[in-house]
Image (cartoon, rainbow, N blue to C red):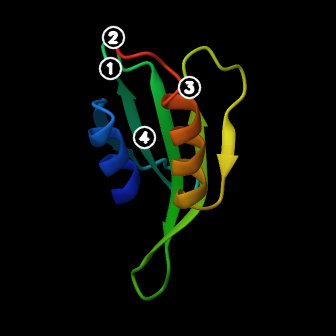
Amino acid sequence: MLKRTKQFLRSQHYEYDKTYIRPLMVPDSVYVLKFGKDHRNNRVVVKYSHTWTGRVKINEIAVRLHKQKHPRIFKHEADMVKYLNKHLSKRTPD
C-alpha cells in the first residue's frame, strides 16, 4: 500500500515506519505511516476497506506534517505525493 509514497520518501532520504490498526467498532482498517529525517514526527493515516472481491479500497488519506493543526485530506495517492513533493522539497537538508 502507498508504493509511490514510499518510493518518494526513499528518494528524499526520509525514513518511515508503518503500522496497521484494525478498530473493533468501525468497518474501516487503518494504516499509519510515520516518517521523518531525524525524528518520525510526520504521519500519513490511510483509512481503507476491502471490496467483496478482496481488493483494497482507499477511503481517505490524511497527512499531518510537523506542527500542523489540521490534517490535509486526499482521495488519491497521486494528489498526496504532489503535496508532499511541494512541501518537503522546500526544507533544507539536515
> Residue at horizontal 34%, vertical 58%?
3
- Distance Cα–Cα, label 3 vs label 1: 12 Å
* Disc 4 residue crowd, few under 14, some 14–19, many 20+, Cα 10 Å: some
From the image, tell me which residue sits under label 2. 94
Vertical position of residue 41 compared to residue 35: above or below: above
- Distance Cα–Cα, label 4 vs label 3: 13 Å
If you read the primary sequence from the N terminus, does the residue marked by circle 1 or circle 4 appear first? 4
* Disc 3 residue crowd, few under 14, some 14–19, many 20+, Cα 10 Å: some
Q: Nearer the viewer, mark 1 or mark 4?
A: 1
Vertical position of residue 26 compared to residue 65: above or below: below
> Residue at horizontal 61%, vertical 55%?
79
Q: Is residue 48 left or right of residue 2?
A: right
Quadrant of the rendered image containing residue 18? top left
Q: Amino acid at mark 1?
A: Lys
Q: Which mark is residue 62?
A: none
Question: Mark 3–mark 1 contact, CB under 8 Å?
Answer: no
Quarter of the image with the C terminus in it: top left
- Extreme residue in the right direction: 70
From the image, tell me which residue sits under label 4. 32
Question: Mark 1–mark 2 contact, CB under 8 Å?
Answer: yes
From the image, tell me which residue sits under label 3. 65
If you read the primary sequence from the N terminus, does the residue marked by circle 4 or circle 3 appear first? 4
